[in-house]
Amino acid sequence: MADNLLDKASILLTPTAYNDGSMLSIKPENGDGDFDFQRSGNASRVNSSGNVVTESANIPRIDYTDGCGSWLLEPQSTNLITQGNDLSNWSFGRTTRTITDGINPDGTTEKVLVLATSASNGTHRCYSNSTAIIPNEDYTISVYVKKGTASKIEMELKTLSESPDGFGECVFDINNETITNGKFEVFNDDWYRIQSTGSLNTSTSGIIFMYIYNEDGDRSYVATGNENLYLWGVQLEQQSYATSYIPTNGSIATRLADIANNSGNSSLINSTEGVLYAEIAALADDLNIEGISISDGSISNRVVIFKWSNSNSIRARVSSNGINVLNQTFSVSDITDFNKIAISYKLNEFKVYINGTNVFNGTSGAVPIGLNTLSFDTDGTSFTPFYGKNKALAVYKEALTDAELQSLTTI
Amino acid sequence: MIHKRYTFNDKAQADSKISKFFDIDEEGNKVPNERAAFIYLDKFVLVQGEYDEEGIEIVAPTYTEGYALDVVWHNLEESPYGWKTYEVEPESPCHTLY
């Protein structure tokens, strides 16, 4: 951000500082731009060293999953696997579960090694307990996996009526870092987190199956005693994507949602003219409407950057006394990548910039009245909150020039 | 903040109870009027199923009866009116908060 744009910002939030119950803004320094933060329980994140760590209730999270820190705001989610940490209540077919020395992604030092053992030809697998499933809803399986002497794993959610395939059939080749029907992230110490998403048509129960392939990439084989790999942190969520790790140790567990709001006041947010700027990445292209706003605490007067209900789309909205004077939708190449978005508002002059491009100019319309709060939601009251990653959020008390808006939003 | 566990007759009854904690704004959106986190749990497995090596279910699992719902009430000190009847306190809860 250029120096003059830094100077001009009345509120500037970056992923740098927080305390219990607050996300601390860089500007202003008196705390009036700080966000109230609430989460009624623990949550995990990836720290700057690349380890999975737990944060206590009401502690905001700066996450480094992609190597660069960003605020992480997530919805409520439940891990339906009752023993996701160490697989101690799982069943093992032609395999054994052994605890070995080593470091898990959370820094604990008892790794779970799954070893193919049978000398008879067949699949070598382990599987979870049953869990209740709602038909036609998206579910996502995720697991941390590390190469042993085997380097290929298949995971899927199986059910009676989806016989024999369930959904997913996600196959991850660790040596070649290739995956089918899923995606993966790289972690410290050669760990990977793989995930696969799908839905079931009719079944009301399911189990997670994992198959260990042999060195030749065979799914069915006679074990030589040299086919093994490490597993940790299995998760099954009713989501279209994997959220941060939710440990389970005998019962299913829920991480509650993050809430961040109540930044700013009428002296920091100008209703006559200004700019709302955000550098954000969605958690998924899930078509849920979410947003970040400056508002008067209602939907009548607000400036909102929405993640919209079309695929990979952003909606910019300015409402004045209940009338939407700007309400336009724009496409981005990938809503889960970081995008830089700015909405500039002034009487009869509205502009939208996305990633350095001027995508909208409006020449008529009134401005909002009584703007006084900046929130990770769409009206200052936690309605349709933004869930995703945020690297920067700023408010300006003046409508910036085209050159400034272009500079601000250029990646 | 309190965390309470409930078992309703079915999902429709749970949804009906929950609906009273939402208003409809002028754009037709459901807006919460009470700060609460509703955790839809449905059923828990009582007896595990049995499966063959391809994951085909041989014996179906059995489940708890009713519709399980956990709620975190942020501003209440006890269950709201009409909910207490359905409150349960299992010795070994099948669901916990992280």
Image (cartoon, rainbow, N blue to C red):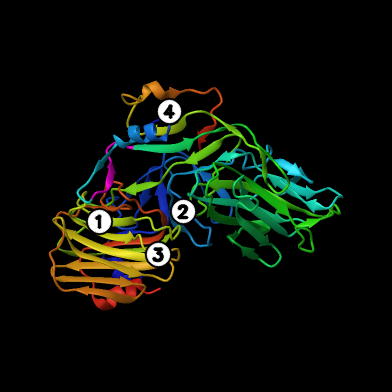
> As rendered, which of A206 and A257 lies closer to the eye?
A206
Left or right of residue A235: residue B54: right
Q: Chain of mark 4?
A: B
Can residue A110 be seen by looking at this rendering? no
- The structure residue drawn at horizontal position 86% and vertical position 54%, both measured from the top left corner, is A224
On the image, numbered disc 4 is attached to which residue?
Answer: B9
Q: Position of residue B57 (x, y in %)?
A: 66, 42
Please state which amino acid type lies under the numbered disc 3.
Answer: Ser
Return the residue at label 2. Answer: A62
- Image mark for residue B12: none
Q: Are marks 4 and 3 in contact (CB under 8 Å)?
A: no
Q: Which residues are magenta?
A: B28-35
Q: Is residue A59 above or below residue A216?
A: above
User: Callout 3: few (<14), some (14-19), or many (20+) C-alpha neighbours within 10 Å?
Assistant: some
Which residue is under mark 1? Answer: A294
- Answer with mark 3 or mark 1, whichever residue precedes in sequence: 1
Q: Nearer the viewer, residue A362 or A123?
A: A123
Q: Amino acid at mark 1?
A: Ile
Residue at 41%, 49% (x, y): give it: A18
Residue at mark 3: A311
Amino acid bearing label 2 = Ile
Q: Give the CA distance from mark 2 to mark 1.
A: 23 Å
| C-alpha separation, residue under disc 4 versus residue under disc 3 | 38 Å
- Which label sits in the foreground, 2 or 1? 1
